[in-house]
Amino acid sequence: MTSSTPHALRGLAACGLLSLSAAAQPPAPAGAGLGPGALAPLLEEVSPDALIATVRSLENFGTRHTLSETESDTRGIGAARRWLLREFQAIGGGLQPSLETFDVPPGVRLPQGATVVNVVAVLPGTMPAAAQRAYYVVGHYDSRNADVMDATGDAPGANDDASGTALVLELARLLASRPLESTVVFLCTAGEEQGLLGARAHALNLTGEKAWRLCMVLSNDIVGDPVPGPAVDGLSAWPGDLTTTPDLRAAAEGPDPRRVVRVFSEGIPRNPSAAELARLRTLAAESDSPSRQLARFIADVALTERLLVQPMPVFRPDRFLRGGDHTPFNEAGHAAVRFTTLHEDYSRQHADVVQRGGKPYGDTAEFVDAPYLADVARLNLAALVHLANAPTPPANVRILTAGLSPNTTLRWSPSPEPDVAGYEVVWRDTTQWQWAHSLDVGDRTEVTLPINKDNVYFGLRAYDRDGFRSPVTFAGAAER
């Protein structure tokens, strides 16, 4: 979390580069109950009972495999998507629900090809200058068991990913009558288990008239089962003298799994151009992609709102040998992150519902922790409110490098929203993961600071009259 530093303020004032009044904090929130730090009443409306009811309803379709039954009203992916559409329609408010259909050609997991249907509900933004910014919350509603090609056997998919789908539906229920300044998209994808098909088709379709001016994505996949069951691989006991190794024990146990959720984010795009790679290398910006700034932003919001479940940023695109729906959005050039529980129990993922040696296997609703899922939903809800009500991150932020100087001059293009009140410069040591310092520089587009640009990373964010801050834009470099 960033904070102003008194010694920096004194230094700026002494150098005549910035008045102390310009370094004041942004104005307090302007009411409506949705200002930063004042979301508690809204967050309390998240219902654990509603979330687990949705998980059980989806589980009751037996299987939601992408190639499963589509005509039945009680079993298969067709019944599940029609049920989800009806749920979005019943919410009403400003939601615009629909089915989104794509024909996918044959592939390894689709021998005959398939029709993939996403369920999507759009909540248009209320501010004309911000409505073409879209913030997504995503969960995939398809499921699978141990055999990825088994389209008929039971595949309850309670945690993977009825939990994420339930979260999407619950946030739609809470925000439908409370439209935000920017557009919010509630997306339930199909085909994730067959190769991220629904998310990829949607992301690739965001072109031309369907393109957003800015798109950021919160993907929730495996967010309801925080505590794994007993070990089944023979390693439940510590071997040899490792029991006396405190550092190893601490690393293995980690934080309380009921109080954190991992947030994965990519650093370097998958197929950068030679020019982009050269730029990243010159700036040492390997860990400052828009997705990384989104992850940092979520961490800031969690602290601001004093949330029970805090994000644990993981600076890699995803887990080993696994993938998720945030990836196609990354590949299409959008900022996207993945929420996932700290510990995953693989006996409950992609597993047949059976008993072995007295231990239950299978991804069933009995293992979903409704209060934990509600806390993860609150984190997503708080992030969405902050993102959609804040200004656009400032553009073309750069450090001026026309000549040698011990000072740092930053210049940028203003954010377009009419309620922008000013900007904050942020910086951190090159070895820190989070922005450590901030300085309010008021409503301007250039500032010179008595800080050596060689020693720290700089960024900039905009804030509005209600006190909402945008994600940070990492500072590049240019001669002017």
Image (cartoon, helix red, strand yellow):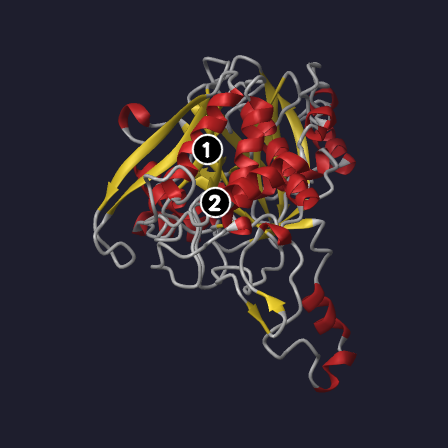
Name the residue nearer the viewer: 34 or 472. 34
| Rendered image: mark on residue 84 | 1
Q: Mark yes or no: residue 198 visible.
A: yes
Q: Secondary structure at mark 2?
A: loop
Going from the N terminus, do you reach mark 2 or mark 1 first?
1
Label 2, residues with CA under 10 Å away: few <14, some 14-19, many ≥20: some
Label 1, residues with CA under 10 Å away: few <14, some 14-19, many ≥20: many
Q: Quick check: 35 above or below 216?
A: above
Q: Secondary structure at mark 1?
A: helix
Q: Quadrant of residue 345?
A: bottom right
Name the residue nearer the viewer: 88 or 155. 155
Q: What residue would you read off at disc 2?
A: 289
| Spot occupied by residue 316 in the image (x, y as percentages of width and height) | 50, 56
Name the residue nearer the viewer: 226 or 68. 68
| Spot occupied by residue 161 in the image (x, y as percentages of width and height) | 50, 47
Amino acid type at mark 1: Leu
Q: Mark yes or no: residue 404 visible.
A: no
Q: Quadrant of residue 28?
A: top right
Name the residue nearer the viewer: 219 or 189. 189
Residue beneath the point at 60% across and 21% down: 422
Q: Quadrant of the N terminus?
A: top right
Q: CA distance from mark 2 to mark 1?
A: 34 Å
Residue beneath the point at 55% across and 18% down: 179
Residue beneath the point at 21% across and 48% down: 105
Amino acid type at mark 2: Ser
Left/right placement of residue 18 relative to residue 223 reads: right
Going by the picture, which residue comes out furthest to the bottom?
A: 240
Q: Quadrant of the C terminus?
A: top left
